[in-house]
Amino acid sequence: MAINWTEAQIEEVVASVIKNLKGEAPAEECKNWDSTQYCGRRLIGVYADMNDAIDAATAGYKAVRSMRLEEREKIIAAIRELCRTEAPIMAKLGVAETKMGRVAHKTAKHILVADKTPGTADIVAQVKTGDDGLTLTEMAPFGVVGSITPSTNPSETVICNSIGMIAAGNGVVFNPHPNAIATSNYAVDLVNRASKMAGGPAVLVASVVKPTLDTAQIMYKHANIRMLVCTGGPGVVKSVLSSGKKAIGAGAGNPPVIVDDTADIKKAAKDIIDGCSFDNNLPCIAEKEVFAFKNIADELISEMQKNGAYKINAEQAARLAQIVLVDAKNPKTGIVKKTVSRDCVGRDAAVLLAKIGVRVGEEIRCIICETDFEHPFVQHELMMPILPIVRVNDIDQAIDLAVKAEHGNRHTAHMHSKNIDHLTRFARAVETTIFVKNAPSYAGIGFGGEGHTTFTIAGPTGEGLTSARSFTRYRRCVLSDGFRII
């Protein structure tokens, strides 16, 4: 079964997976390792051709569909166990491959996925009886689900989606983000190893060696794919939603934070920096811009600085904006717009500060700066530990600007306040899928907060925080004039 990994073994596995990704010879087979572990072999369930991957996922669907719920749950329990044990490997692999995030935080995210992703208990039948008999409504699988996964939370999303989709009785084929192939496919391999350990099919979920736009198109159009689930940027979400198939889209966000003058300022400052800096701001729910009442702004900034924030001035912010935001030309329209630099997304605050000549230690987790509302740091979802702070006069101005900054994504918003009226007004105005009050952003996905977790938060299509039931379709069975016993 699972083993306790040493740092040397983790490094060896990471190096071996990346070598395989590059087409180089795998690492020499490790001696005396449990056979369920990866060490220099071909990843299970990863195919050169998307059609072969879909065929394998179809076979997996047929196998899981015939299983009892307790058999599915046994596989899910094995996935959870391997995910907990190999969380450090996937975390280190994710940072090594994508150059984004923090190993400790990614490890915590994998543990969160293992512990709080709903399984088969989420699949609940409904029964209605009356004078005309009995009606049974059950949550049935769609079939084979095609899943697009991101580079920001690659293995976390693969495992979270796998647990939910398998619990619902589906097969799954993944088309991972091209910048996180090794990490995503390692997670696919882990799910298949868990399935085999639990007596399930050797290949339960599938992926491709080299995911591209072409492999995605094959997945979109293939007759066996009954549902598409996309966790990614606006472009890929739009393509999935225009596929003509049932689709779940987890889109962009730009979560604002309001801090009013009734808040516990010390706690608010710590919570905001903890949330904003978590995995270097990669989670889509993370705090992206703050609107602070003028009469508490100085205290808030001072407390943020005590919690690992480094404040830059306006001139430094302008220089940093020129580095982290670059011009991108739309190939169809020729329009040039600012977009985030891939070289800066998810990087440590110290790395970003060094780009403008500021040297700091590892204790600095976040960069803060005071800006006006129109500043690009406010208007763009950076996915970096950079937090602009805008001073506001009152709750009316705070809500007005925060709603505008969220850009109608209706994804996530945060507020620190003890005023119920303020909290209620903002929640109603912003209409986000997640609204976090007086806590770090990650409480919204069950990390230090109640409720289940997911890394596919479907705002555009309305499913919200997806779980096993999101990947089902309702089927009704009616028995007229019968089996009502009262």
Image (spheres, rainbow, N blue to C red):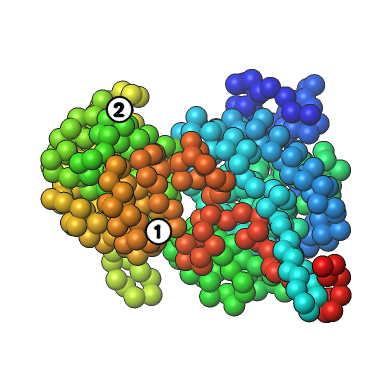
Image quadrant holding the N terminus, namely top right
Image height check: is 422 above or below 485? Answer: above
In the image, taking residue 467 as reference, residue 58 lies left or right, namely right
Label 2 packing within 10 angstroms: few (<14), some (14-19), many (20+): many
Residue at the spot 39% in from the left edge and 39% down from the top edge: 440
Instruction: Determine whether, in the image, residue 137 is placed left or right of residue 424.
Output: right
Residue 157's label in the rendered image is: none
The image quadrant of residue 350 is top left
Q: How far from the left and from the top, in percent, is residue 306?
A: 26, 25
The three-letter amino acid code for the residue at tag 1 is Thr
Cα separation, mark 1 vs mark 2, equals 28 Å
Q: Which mark is residue 307?
A: 2
Q: Which residue is mark 1?
A: 432
Mark 1–mark 2 CB contact (< 8 Å): no
Percent position (x, y) of residue 439? 38, 39
> Which residue occupies 53% across, 33% down?
108
Query: Which percent across, then down, holds residue 297?
Result: 17, 39
> Which residue type does callout 2 highlight?
Asn
Is residue 137 shown above or below 131? above
Single out the residue that lies furthest toward the front: 486
Q: Quadrant of the C terminus?
A: bottom right
Q: Is residue 376 left or right of residue 178?
A: left
Position of 15 relative to 473 (above/below): above
Residue 294 x/y as whole percent: 13, 43
